[in-house]
Amino acid sequence: KADEEAKAAEEKRLAEEAARKRAEIDQLMQLARDARAAGRLEEAESRLQDIMAIDKDDAAAIKEFDSLQEQITAVDRERKDKIRTALQGAEKKVDAGEFDGARALLQQAIDDVGEDQGLLAAMHDVDAAVRATERAGGAALVGPLDLGNIGRAAAVSDPQGAVLGLLRSRV
């Protein structure tokens, strides 16, 4: 009889633990979906990773994670395209002698893609800054590009996705 009671107690404990894990997973999934809907993709990714740390085989989390990775890749591509377009527009403005307009285009692109993370930084050596960013795990989004009389520019992102515009001004 003692063995039966011990077995029943163990089954009850396991059932309670499974229910607790399921509730935690459901809560994290809702937080992930809310973050994704609000455009906070890195937060959504983190919540999904939390779920998979609890249950690496959770099919819903895996499916959501895969879909989120596709969305993040598309957003990264869109960011690169916006910065590339801005740099091309800035180069045209430089050729026309509109240096302030060129700077404004670059800053606007960084602001648009950086979600309050974007900055435009003055550099002595843009190429060296890009190489250092890549060595540290970041990525060159665009450039370095020669902008004629205005200088040299690039756009990079750190490993967390924050965007930084780099400019070596000749003006």
Image (tube, helix red, strand yellow):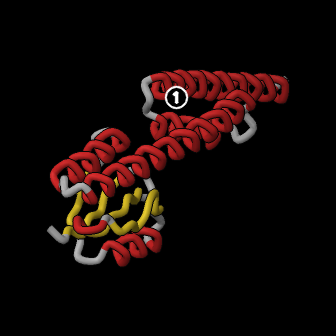
Question: Residue at point 58% right, 44% down?
Answer: 73
Q: Quadrant of residue 7?
A: top right
Q: Position of residue 51 (x, y in %)?
A: 60, 35
Tell me the residue that label 1 is attached to.
32
In the rendered structure, the answer to whether residue 166 lies left or right of residue 59 reads left
Which quadrant does the N terminus fall into?
top right
Of 23 and 33, nearer the camera is: 33
Picture quadrant of residue 74: top right
- Name the spot of residue 120 as percent of width and height, x first: 24, 56
Q: Nearer the viewer, residue 156 or 64?
A: 156
For the point 71% across and 32% down, the residue is 63
Residue lying at 78% horizontally and 22% vertically, measured from the top left? 8
Secondary structure category for the residue under label 1: helix
Quadrant that contains the C terminus: bottom left
Q: Is residue 58 left or right of residue 38?
A: right
Task: Tell me what residue is drawn at x 44 percent, y 29 percent.
Answer: 39
**Residue 59 in the image: x percent, y percent?**
75, 31
Above or below, comparing residue 29 to residue 139 in the picture:
above
